[in-house]
Image (spheres, rainbow, N blue to C red):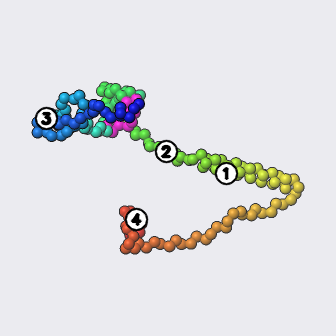
Amino acid sequence: MSRKSKTLEKPSFKYLQCKVKDCYNEERVDADAKSVKCSRCVQRAVGAPQVKAQKVSSGRPAGWHFMAEFVDKDGNVFHKGVEQPELKGTLKPTPPKEKTTPKKRISKEEKLVALHKKKMLAKKKEADKKAKAQAKKDGIKLPAKKKVGRPKKKATPKKRKVATKTSPKRKGSRYK
Ligand SMILES: [Zn+2]
């Protein structure tokens, strides 16, 4: 490719003024375009998009359409989402399902740690059992179990925080 061919012989676009009277907006158009209507004028002609009203909750539980039988608060009976007018008021309203709290998610590491702890505890128990059995066999009294671990600290009363003028008061703060 020679350097000369880089310069365009024919521009690929041009600017045209909007064809609407009293509108002087310029739009970038194709070189062959004869006229243009600018985006603002198109928008004005089309009008603002309609925003659909938000769905209003029926107050029925999720999936009531698929329940073999569902009775709403007013006693309307539905069989798989189809109303059964002749049964209206003959049945008790379907009680709302209790919400179940989702289980706390644990990471892989936490799972492994928990498993390890469990295994170690089981091992220790097994060892203790064996030692006890052996001692019984030999007729030796085992020394009393010593408590392992750090001795517990005596609980010291916590210092109460005093709200100062500079500290911003949070909503629902204990310290008022
Ligand atoms: Zn225009």
- Which residue is at the front of the view, 44 or 61? 44
Element type where label 3 sits in the image: loop
**Mark 4 or 3, nearer chain start:** 3
What residue is shown with label 2? 102
Q: Main secondary structure of the magenta part?
A: loop
Query: Does the stretch in magenta take in 65?
Result: yes
Question: Dot 4: within a 10 Å radius of its alpha carbon, few (fewer than 14), some, or many (20 or more) residues?
Answer: few
In the image, 84: left or right of 139?
A: left
Element type where label 2 sits in the image: loop
Question: Dot 2: within a 10 Å radius of its alpha carbon, few (fewer than 14), some, or many (20 or more) residues?
Answer: few
What residue is shown with label 4? 173
**Mark 1 or 4, nearer chain start:** 1
Element type where label 1 sits in the image: helix
Task: Nearest to the eye among marks 4 and 3: give it.
Answer: 3
Q: Is disc 3's CB within 8 Å of ligand 1?
A: yes
Residue 126: give x, y in percent of width and height. Answer: 76, 50
Query: What is the three-letter code of the residue carrying label 1?
Result: Lys
- Which residue is at the front of the view, 59 or 170? 170
**Mark 2 or 3, nearer chain start:** 3
Query: What is the three-letter code of the residue carrying label 4?
Result: Ser
Residue at 18%, 33% in the rendered image: 37
Q: Separation of disc 1 and disc 3 at Cα? A: 79 Å
What residue is shown with label 1? 117
Q: Separation of disc 2 and disc 3 at Cα? A: 60 Å
Query: Does the stretch in magenta take in 8?
Result: no
What is the magenta range? Answer: 58-66
